[in-house]
Amino acid sequence: MKRSSSLTWAAFAAFSLATALGLSWVTSVLLDFEREKREREASERMHADLRLAAWRVDTMLAPILAEEAARPASHFRPFSPLNNSLDSGGESNVSGGVLVPSPILNGSGKWTTLNFQFDSRGTVTSPQVPQGAHAKWARNFGLSDESAAENGARLKDFSSSVRLADLSRMLDEALSAPDPPESSAKPLANAPVFAGAGPPGRDFGQGVDDYNARSRAYDRMTTQQSSTNTRIWNDGETVSRPVPMWISGGSGAPVLILARRVQAGRDRFVQGAVLDWDAIRSGAEAEIRDLFPGATLAPRLPGSPADPNSALAVLPLEIDPGRIRPVDDPLLTPLRIGIGALWAAFAAGFAFLLAGIASLLALNRRRLDFVSAVTHELRTPLTTFRMYAEMLEDGMVPPGKTAEYYSVLREESLRLTHLVQNVLDYSRLESNRSKSRIESAGMEFHLGRIVPALRDRCDRAGVPFRWAGAARPDLEVRLDSSAVGQILLNLADNACKYGRSWVSLSVDVCGGSAEFAVSDGGEPIDYADRARIFEPFVRGRSSEGKGPGVGLGLALCRRWARAMNGELEYRPGPPHAFVLRIPA
């Protein structure tokens, strides 16, 4: 039996452990999937916001930079001749003797700090730094000496750090690059190197497509829908598209410029503008502050990898979103609720199987205990029956002993009857086939049926019976006298077998219940046995060897009591007693 139980529990433990490990693995996979999905969605939202931010900044800068690209070459001189004009008499002035100031004499806007022009000999000039007589004329058009001095310092710093050869080489590399297909970006200077690990993902592909769209829109603005890198002005000047680039300034810090090639007859120039990097950065960061409060605009140097979602198409810049808010991790999600329900179902199933196996093993143990106990209890009276019957049949009993032998046979038959009756009653209670017969009558009426039976049992056992009386015998109560009598008779029978000094019965009414207390003068039940004395086929250690029995009486009594919505309890005393409480 013990080996079978051990194998059963070992198999159940192995099955439960395997199921729990499998469920844990599934839980881990599902939670990882949910976390990756949440992070992927957050990344997609961030990249979508980055693309929106890049559109905003490109849209903010493109018109101003396109205006710089549309300037004719004459704007890069402080004063230039006005051709094809009329004098006061209406005569045509074709000599070019009339000079007009450059529109950018006082600066070209808030995004630039200086405009410059390199001639073929490498001499650099600026319309904001007029020389000689032009300087005197410029004062009449609003250029103050302080502004001229500041512009001169900027021009000196610029000319000392930039060589025409280096600038020409960078321009040639950008302008000579072949046009890519429509699906890729227009080759602006310092075009970003899109870095991606492995095959491009969805965000990477959308970023490249978005960058290409912004690049083409800006390119159309700067080339006036031309499919080439140059445009021709009415006066015959050929101007390339402007190329944004980073160069090293005099202080070593990078400087952002726009540069272009100009062909006017035989003269070739490199013209451009030094962009105000601080103003551009401040304006761009203010433009996207609602999307990324901590975003900054960073230079994108030549050859450095870039994210197509955050790279600008107008200028070699990239948006750094700054610190990104952590991905939300809600405590309850549909998946987690489902996993919790799955674990709850597993726990419920585990508890159900545990209870079922324990119940089956307990039932099997009770069955074996019942077979063992009943077999043992039947062996003695059956042996007595057989032996005494054979002796009576063979005439081996002396004439004076015959009555005694018949008396023993009668006692053994009563013992068998009591045993069989208890087994049948327990079986009926187990299968819920026992029905109570409740009668409403005075307490004295019920006791008139119960007390004589108890007294007779004690007399036959030779144990004194003490009737302590009943409180309020005139009280009308509703009881099943037969069931109560059976309970008290079994309790008295145990007291006679194990107490052997005296048996007492007292009846009281307390809290709406009738309390029947059966006590005896024997030793109290051991403390270690009190938790199990009401289990079927269990006998306390203090009762072993003191009389026959299968350990079914107390279990049967408690089930009878509970069938009447009552309870049977043990009271240690002194004197110790079994107390039956029945709602009255």
Image (tube, rainbow, N blue to C red):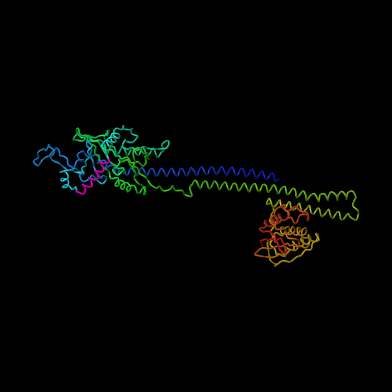
- Residue 149 part of the magenta-drawn span: yes
Query: What is the chief secondary structure element of the magenta stretch?
Result: helix
- Asked where in the image residue 65 lies, by quadrant, the reply is top left
Report x, y in % for residue 395: 90, 50
On the rendered image, what quadrant is the C terminus found in? bottom right
Report x, y in % for residue 533: 71, 55
On the rendered image, what quadrant is the N terminus found in? top right
State left or right for residue 7 relative to residue 116: right
- Residue 132 part of the magenta-drawn span: no
Residue 194 can be seen in this image: yes
State left or right for residue 550 relative to residue 407: left
Report x, y in % for residue 201: 41, 38
User: Viewer-proximal residue, 374 or 208?
Assistant: 208
Query: At 17% from the left edge and 42% from the top edge, which residue is drawn?
Result: 79
Residue 224 can be seen in this image: no
Work out which residue is located at the far left of the displayed protein and give it: 89
State left or right for residue 87 relative to residue 435: left
User: Viewer-proximal residue, 313 or 282?
Assistant: 282
User: Viewer-proximal residue, 406 or 200?
Assistant: 200
- Asked where in the image residue 498 lies, by quadrant, the reply is bottom right
Q: Is residue 25 shown above or below 563?
A: above
User: Viewer-proximal residue, 337 or 132?
Assistant: 132
- Asked where in the image residue 500 lies, by quadrant, the reply is bottom right
- Span shown in magenta: 144-161
